[in-house]
Image: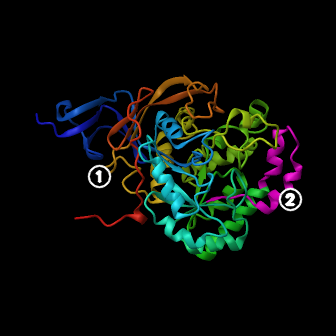
Amino acid sequence: MTQTYDLILKNGTVVSPGGEELVDVAVRGEKIVAIGKFEASQAGEVYDATGLHILPGVIDSQVHFREPGLEHKADLETEARSAALGGVTAVFEMPNTNPSTTTPEMLTDKLARAKGRMDVDHAFYAGATNENPHLLAEMEQMQGCCGVKVFMGASTGDLLVKDDEGVEAVLRAIKRRAAFHSEDEYRLEERRSLAVEGDWHSHIVVRDVEAAVSSTRRLLKIARKTGKRIHVLHISTAEEMELLRDAKDVASVEVLPNHLTLAAPDCYDRLKGFAQQNPPVREQRHQDALWRALNAGIVDVVATDHAPHTREEKERPYPASPSGMPGVQTFVPVMLTHVNNGKLSLRRFVELTSAGPQRVFGIATKGRIAEGYDADFTIVDMKHKQTITHEWAKAKCGWTPYDGFEAQGWPVATIIRGRFVMRDGEITRQGGGKPVRFNETLEPAEI
């Protein structure tokens, strides 16, 4: 029989938000071209997925890969490789590098740095300041830009738009959905003196619930005033979820595996500065509320906020220790463990990590297993048990907060646009990542 396809994924269970089906998937070039039942002789390559689940490629829509300027702790090449090893097919990288990504030239520089070095597909955020709203309309329309990022509270780096007038100016300048780190800088300034040296438990005192809630309340008011779409990142409080439940007209919602998995005070007892991030990991009642919101449909996206620092930096006494944890490689196994433990369904996981990002950000031809879409797949073994260790984690920082975590559910292959990038824990193709395309910035095609 004449070979019709380049690759067939056979005998696997294909998962979509609508259900699971034992079906084959055929790939030609970079695209999915057929779904059904096929003979092995119809393809140049056949992958036997018996006993495995074939998911749409997992998208991590919030990562910090630290390049340029902070390459001692991470860079685009090392962190993208870590992503591919963890079953992630695309990442959206944040602008708080050194220098920050606040001009078209800096965005162009990041895309140039990524070319030929990143194993996974990628896009970059434009960083908003009080001084650059006049540049943001141009930046958000650039190829490879996933949108505008605004820090309402100071975190790692020097990007900050803390005032309502500044936030409003940013939103009025742009057309696409903007992503927000929502903590109230005015309240944080008042409470920084409450930090107890060497005591990471005081992190949730300094960056308290009200700092998050007051910022999100202000943000929702401005979004409605301007009639603009917002994406509120790493929600950490029960109270914010109540606000966001009634704001689905303007706001999409992200939560992190860290906030769904770790809880105070235990995480600070065990991990000390290695558990520190912004907004902080909070008490169990907040984690419980995040899970309720996730399964109630309030949450649109789960992403990692992968934000590595070196061991030496994280071992500094609080508050000199920096905030942020690596997470892109542990994303899939940690969340699949929650699936196996009954915290969410596999279909909901797919909705939150592929279909959800596709919808929120308007990603072109990714996020679904459907004819005409990119052949991006995260293939997982839901029965495989393995302990996450520092040694397994390949982020440049060399550690993970999940060291010793007993995972069930493991990525066994990462396929991006029809090419295997990771197979059985080994990278098989390097540097082939391309910029992600978005519906709102599509260029006219040459006919």
Q: Which of the two residues, 76 or 207, is positioned nearer the viewer here?
A: 76
Corner quadrant of residue 415: top left
Q: Residue 16 in the image: x percent, y percent?
A: 40, 45
Q: Of the residues shown, which amino acid type is indicated by label 2?
A: Glu
- State the separation of the CA atoms marked 1 and 2: 53 Å
Badge 2: residue crowd in 10 Å (few <14, some 14–19, many ≥20): few
Corner quadrant of residue 142: bottom left
Q: Which of the two residues, 17 or 396, is positioned nearer the viewer here?
A: 396
Do callouts 1 and 2 mark residues in contact (Cβ within 8 Å)?
no
Q: Secondary structure at mark 1?
A: loop
Q: Is residue 92 magenta?
A: no
In the picture, measured across the screen, residue 394 lies left or right of residue 271, that is left
Q: Which residue is mark 2?
A: 190
Q: Of the residues shown, which amino acid type is indicated by label 1?
A: Gly
Badge 1: residue crowd in 10 Å (few <14, some 14–19, many ≥20): some
Q: Secondary structure at mark 2?
A: helix
Q: Which of the two residues, 433 or 230, is positioned nearer the viewer here?
A: 433
Tell me the magenta residue range.
180-209
Q: Residue 126 in the image: x percent, y percent?
A: 55, 60
Name the quadrant of the C terminus: bottom left
Res 302 seen here: yes
Q: In the displayed image of the protein, which residue is found farthest to the left?
A: 1
| Chain-order first, disc 1 or disc 2 | 2
Residue 242 got which mark?
none
Q: Main secondary structure of the magenta part?
A: helix
Q: Which residue is mark 1?
A: 372
Q: Residue 297 in the image: x percent, y percent?
A: 55, 53
